[in-house]
Amino acid sequence: MNTQALFGQLLIGLINGSFYALLSLGLAVIFGLLNIINFTHGAQYMVGAFVAYFLLNKAGLGYWWALVITPFAVGAVGVIIERTMLSRLYKLDHLYGLLLTFGLALIFEGAFHHQFGSAGMPYSIPESLQGVQNLGFMYLPNYRAWVIVASLAICISTWFVIERTKLGAYLRAATENPTLVQAFGVNVPRMITLTYGAGVGLAALAGVFAAPIYQVSPQMGSSLIIVVFAVVVIGGMGSIMGSIVTGFGLGIIEGLTKYFYPQASSTVIFVIMAIVLMIRPQGLFGQR
Amino acid sequence: MSEQAGDHQAHDPSWERRYERNAFVMLFVAFAVMPAFIYPRFGSQLLCFAMFACAFNLLIGFGGLLSFGHAMFFGMGSYLSAHAAKAWGLPVELAILTGAATSLLLGALTGLLAIRRQGIYFAMITLALAQMLYFFCLQAPFTGGEDGIQSVKRGQFLGVIDLNNEVAMYYFVFALFLAAFGLIHRIIHSPFGQVLKAIRENEPRAISLGYHAERYKLAAFVLSATLAGLAGATKAIVAQNASLTDVHWSMSGEVVLMTLLGGMGTVFGPVVGALVIISMQFYLAELGSWVTITQGIIFVVCVLAFRRGIVGEIEAWLRKRRRPG
């Protein structure tokens, strides 16, 4: 057994798992309050990567600036989308939210494709994160280690905010019964808007993390979001911790599959989804 | 998608029947003379996509199930029909049947999984399963990977009618379309279709009345998948190829768009929607990404302002005009 290659694939699995976790977390947060599956999530992740690219090449602002600015910039676009479009759909069947966000994803993807073509654009790793650590059994690039640690930290702080703070308590209460929470004087519509903005911001942040690893290209989000949907079905959207654990876990499983049986690596998550649906249709962490 | 629910109640059935008959006659005449005005090969493709959209509409419009993975049935039907005609040398009618039968099996298999969840989850599950099938088609040896299956022979229908003649091909596809359309019409007006509607409107109540909701939903899913497969199988013969485009998620999105634009849950909406979307793709083809952008805009506009779709709006207008106030 080639341990070097095995750990290499495990590392790639962990990286992919970070993105699965970050994106499914955002989807779960949005779904909890808005009851909408945000199909635009993949496009917003892609836009995040592009914003980082523009900041570097047009404004001369590097990676660390991008990390701060991008989530707010893309999140603000999300706020506008929520205010002007999504907010009109809450009384309708939830499926209309899916259709609308699918349309928005097509618009984003088409527009970026029109401007930049389908060839990927490189984004270099920031200087402070270049270099490699020799762990003895494998070489660990600093940037990849950073992405895993940072994603984990963001996931856990999101969990903390939602499960352990007063703001999170409002959020959870509004998820259960928005009318009652509103009657207590909490501005629920504003909370919904900001929640959508925050979810979108998470997607954009994931996009910045991804920019130096993958090429920045208009279609980087669309295939990823479908895998993330499968991750969400497997985990069930009931619990925040559930989506974090499922995201990382499935990334690792995918990495192992790439090592042991590469032909199945692109389908393994979907196969797991099928098995979970047979045994536990509500998802591993789902309630109902 | 229960919005149209209220519309259906207060109408007198004889008017509805007359409306449907008149609209059908118009549709029939329009398609019957179409080859005189447009390129018949394009007309044949239009009919295939209209069939696809009608099959999709059976599921969303009458079963209330939004599948975001219908490309897998269209694409598998297309691949198997092309493969049967090319590699196995089957005559065209058997090749098309092979494609439809494959989608029937696939529909039963995926349907069993997908109907375990409802609403948004159902959409995500069908999308994910279709993506799995996409990767399968990318790797499987018989699909030809990125190249697809090219230059499929059309041959003779029942050994008599030469389908290499584009006009003959058109009327062959037209006959298939009428058969599928008639079947769907039969299904939605049958007791089975009525139960399906009841489940769409209120599933717990239908269950409490003693109906096995899951079985009905599965049956609707399989029927829809089979007809989508028939559409794909026919398309493979018309276009003489099958490729990854047919199983790609954007194809699933397109059929949703056709049905939404034409009018979900209306009998004629999907046909009109397919006509508009396919013509738009055909005439805007040189503009590249603008096709995607336009499709996205149509989605947004339809959802925000135009949820009944073209035919739905016309029907609503006709009803209002008939009974003012």
Image (cartoon, coloured by chain):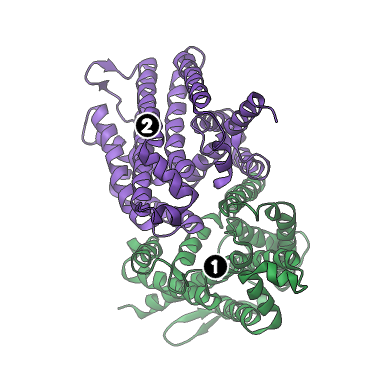
Q: Which mark is residue A215?
A: none
Q: Position of residue B101 (x, y in %)?
A: 27, 40
Label 1 marks which chain's residue?
A
> From the viewer's perspective, is the residue at label 2 or at label 1 nearer?
2
Q: Gap between marks 2 and 1, in whole Å?
A: 42 Å
Rendered position, A210 above or below B46: below
Q: Which chain is purple?
A: B
Q: Colour of chain A?
A: green
The answer to which image quadrant residue A43 occupies is: bottom right
Q: Position of residue A198 (x, y in %)?
A: 68, 68
Q: Position of residue A156 (x, y in %)?
A: 59, 81
Q: Which mark is residue A24?
A: 1
Q: Is A59 left, or right, of B185 in this rendering?
A: right
In terms of depth relative to the viewer, which is nearer, B186 or A60?
B186
- Please indicate, yes or no, whether residue B65 appears anywhere in the rendered image: no
Label 2 marks which chain's residue?
B
Q: Kindly state the secondary structure of the residue where label 2 is placed.
A: helix
Which amino acid does the dot numbered 1 rest on? Ser
Rendered position, B107 above or below A227: above
Residue placed under numbered mark 2 in the picture: B186
